[in-house]
Image: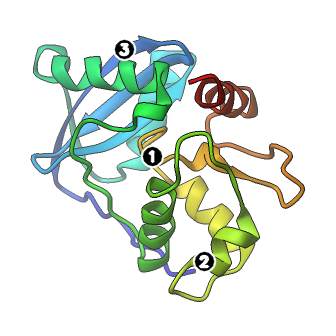
Amino acid sequence: METIEHPFAGEALTYAFTPTVLGLAVAARTEKGVAAVLIGNNKNALLADLRLALDDAVLREDEPAMADVLNKVTGMIASPERGASFPLDLRGSALELAVWDALRKLRPGQTIGYGQLAKSLDLPATPQEVGAACAANRVAVAVPCHRVVKADGSISGYRWGVHRKRKLISLEAAA
C-alpha cells in the first residue's frame, strides 16, 4: 500500500488535551480542520503518539484556542453515533482516504468486516490493506475505524485498544 511520507511536514498545528469517557484524548488541528484525535491514558504518551502521527509538524499547545474543538471531541466520543461536528483535515494515500471515506458513510451501530470493506471500495484492496488504513487513521471516532470487525463479527485490534473499540460499539448500539 502506498503511504504518504510526512503529510504535515513543517505545518503549524494547535493541540490540547481533554478527558473523555474513553480516557484522555488529544486533538490537533490545522487551519483546514482537525487532523488528529488520539486516545490514551496519559499526556506524555499521547504527546509522543501525536508527534509520531503528525511527523515533522510544528506543534503548539493552546487549550483556550482549542476549547470549542475539545468540547465537540468530548461529545463525539461520549455519543459516537452523532459523528464529528467539526471539519476534518485528512491526509493519506488514495487507499487510506477511500477506506476512511467508506467508514464515515457507515450508519452508527453498523459494523463491517475488513474483507467486506475491501470489496466495497472502488480501488483494489485486501483485508490487510484495509486493516493498515484503519491503523493509520489519526482521527479516532470521527473516522469510525471501530466499526470494522473480523469476518465472523468478532472484535479484533484497534489502535487505541480493543476495550475502547468494544465500548464505542456498545455506545452506538445503545443509542
With respect to residue 5, does 135 lie above or below? above
Q: Earlier in the sequence, mark 2 or mark 3?
A: 3
Mark 1 residue crowding within 10 angstroms, few (<14) / some (14–19) / many (20+): few
Residue beneath disc 3: 18
Q: Judge from the rendering whether residue 107 lies leftward or rightward of residue 151; answer left or right.
A: left
Q: Looking at the image, can residue 112 be seen?
A: yes
Question: Mark 2 to mark 1: distance in Å?
Answer: 30 Å
- Whether 93 is drawn above or below 8: the answer is below
- SS class of the residue under badge 2? helix
Residue 78 in the image: state x and y as whole percent: 48, 18
Q: Are dots 2 and 1 in contact, CB under 8 Å? A: no
**Secondary structure under the numbered disc 1 in the rendered image:** helix
Quarter containing the C terminus: top right
Between residues 119 and 5, which one lies in front from this camera angle? 119
Q: What is the CA distance from the residue labelled 1 to the residue labelled 3?
A: 19 Å
Question: What is the secondary structure assignment of the residue under circle 3?
Answer: strand
Residue 17 image-quadrant placement: top left
Image location of residue 46, percent across then percent down: 47, 27
Left or right side of 151 for 13: left
The residue where tag 1 is placed is 52
- Left or right of 175? Residue 158 is right
Cβ atoms at labels 2 and 3 below 8 Å apart:
no
Residue located 37% across and 19% down the image: 75
Which residue is pictured at 64% across the width and 68% down the height?
Answer: 130
- In front: 171, or 158? 171
Q: Few, some or many C-alpha atoms within 10 Å of disc 3 (few <14, some 14-19, many ≥20)?
A: some
Q: Nearer the viewer, residue 84 or 5?
A: 84
Q: Give the residue type that dot 2 points to.
A: Ser
